[in-house]
Image (cartoon, rainbow, N blue to C red):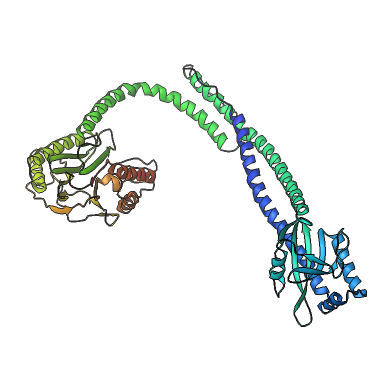
Amino acid sequence: MESKPRSSLGRKTIIGIVLFALMLIIVVCVTVGIGTYYQRVNEYNRQAYNYTRSAADYIDGDRIPGYIETGEKDDYYYMIRDYLNSTQKETAIKYFYVYVPYEDDLVYVWDADTEEGYCELGEHENYMVGGKEATEEVFRKDPPEKLKLTKDDKYGYIASAFTPIFNSAGDPVAVAAVDLYVPDLKRSIARSMVVIFLLIAAVSDLMMAVSYVVIQKKVLRPIGILNDKAGEIIDNLEADKSIDIDIHTNDELETLAESFVKMDDELRTYIRELGAVTAEKERIGAELNIATKIQAGMLPRIFPPFPEREEFELYASMNPAKEVGGDFYDFFLVDEDHLALVIADVSGKGVPAALFMVIAKVLIKNFALQGLSTSEILKKVNDRLCESNDTGFFVTVWIAIVDLTTGDGIASNAGHEHPALWRQKDKSFELVKYKHSLAVAAMDGMKFEEHGFHLDPGDMLYVYTDGVTEAANRSNELFGEERLCDTLNRSGGDAPGKVIGDVSAAIDSFVDGADQFDDITMLAMKYEGPKKD
């Protein structure tokens, strides 16, 4: 098979740095751009109202009615107009004016005359679109200070600030107003943002270049050397030649290079020793593989096992700690209306435990199919196993027989783990705890207790071996009943296969690669209710 061409790590690094830098530039530019935009808008808002407040504080409100009534101008009038003119010339203000609002229009008192179309004292003018409402809003004490945006055929697109002027009695008599030309504001903001964007891009480009040079020297070149030497290890095995790697980065890569040299020496030693044990391992492996297949064949593996039955749903799994294990599960129909559920754990591991498991499984099923109760089944199995139990093995067993027409069940527990029961009405799992009998084959002549239970439609039984709760992580912490119940409750009343899959995933995540010391076996049965006619 022809291998696909591969791109170099250096090329991938460049692409990765460029993509990361582009993403960083976009995120930073958008963030800074938005911040800059609102900062400048707030700045314009603050400046505009600084001008209107200054004018309102500077102007004597008691003089304004006289100017409106007489239309005569005096030195004070011209002083105020000069103040407005000079302010408008030195700032970004488009229009700076003072007016008295009326019901239908407004009358100008002052209007800076640095722009064409200024209005004289006493001149009337209709309100701009929204101007009357804006005036009514500010023509009071402590009005809100927020620029009002207006599009007008005569004045264009402007942002206006309004501040009331009060007389000595504290009554509003006029309005000081400033208009800023919105397109000018947008251009100013855009220029500021472009400069910021260019600075960010320049800094990012510099960082990309520096990053690539450092990565090329400290990472890519040493990795390239290691890649070449890795090929030499294989080529030199037959010649029994060692490799020499010249990497001095004073970091993990130098340590890795030293590990390569050590690995090369150990690999050649290992290959020499491997031949002596390979044949023996292959023989043992073949035998264990056959044993694994035999054991797997003993357990039901086809799901759903009874697709024609609508009263229940079943799923089970068994993950041995070794190639073969001592756990087993079973389920079968005793008759048309009764389902038997079995889960068990033989003491010990490996092939001996697996053989004992096979005997126990066959005996349990044979006695169950004779129509015996759960306690009678365990008693007869116990008697048979104790007859010739020279190995000292015993087996913990949980067995239940469920009436599929009513949901009633009888269970016996011979030293096994507590079963968990999902109640659909309560939407939760709980462990059903009661006193256990001794394990099967532990003592001759034992009797076993029975415990009744009832399943409503939607309820689920979940049973397991101690390999579930005793699964340990690298810190030797156990998975435990609490984590098991939490996992079961997160799965809720899902399908049995989903519940068992969720528990398996939770155990894998918890142990995080630690060795498995015990078989992990689970069985779940969800009762759907009696068969519908």
Q: Position of residue 236 (x, y in %)?
A: 50, 19
**Nearest the eye: 434 or 138:** 138
Up/down of 513 relative to 51, above or below: above
**Nearest the eye: 210 or 103:** 103
Up/down of 472 relative to 11, above or below: below
Up/down of 452 relative to 3, above or below: below
In the displayed structure image, the side of residue 253 where residue 45 appears, left or right: right
Given the current orientation, which residue lies at the most extreme right position?
Answer: 75
In the displayed structure image, the side of residue 78 where residue 511 appears, left or right: left
Up/down of 374 relative to 125, above or below: above
Q: Position of residue 394 (x, y in %)?
A: 16, 43
Residue appearing at x 66%, y 52% in the figure: 34
In the displayed structure image, the side of residue 42 where residue 435 appears, left or right: left
Given the current orientation, which residue lies at the most extreme front position?
Answer: 104
Q: Quadrant of residue 335?
A: top left
From the image, which quarter does the C terminus lie in? top left
Visible in this render: residue 247? no
Q: Quadrant of residue 98?
A: bottom right
**Nearest the eye: 137 or 383:** 137
**Nearest the eye: 329 or 441:** 329
**How many marks do you count on the picture?**
0
Q: Position of residue 251 (x, y in %)?
A: 58, 38
Q: Position of residue 92 (x, y in %)?
A: 81, 58
Visible in this render: residue 496? yes
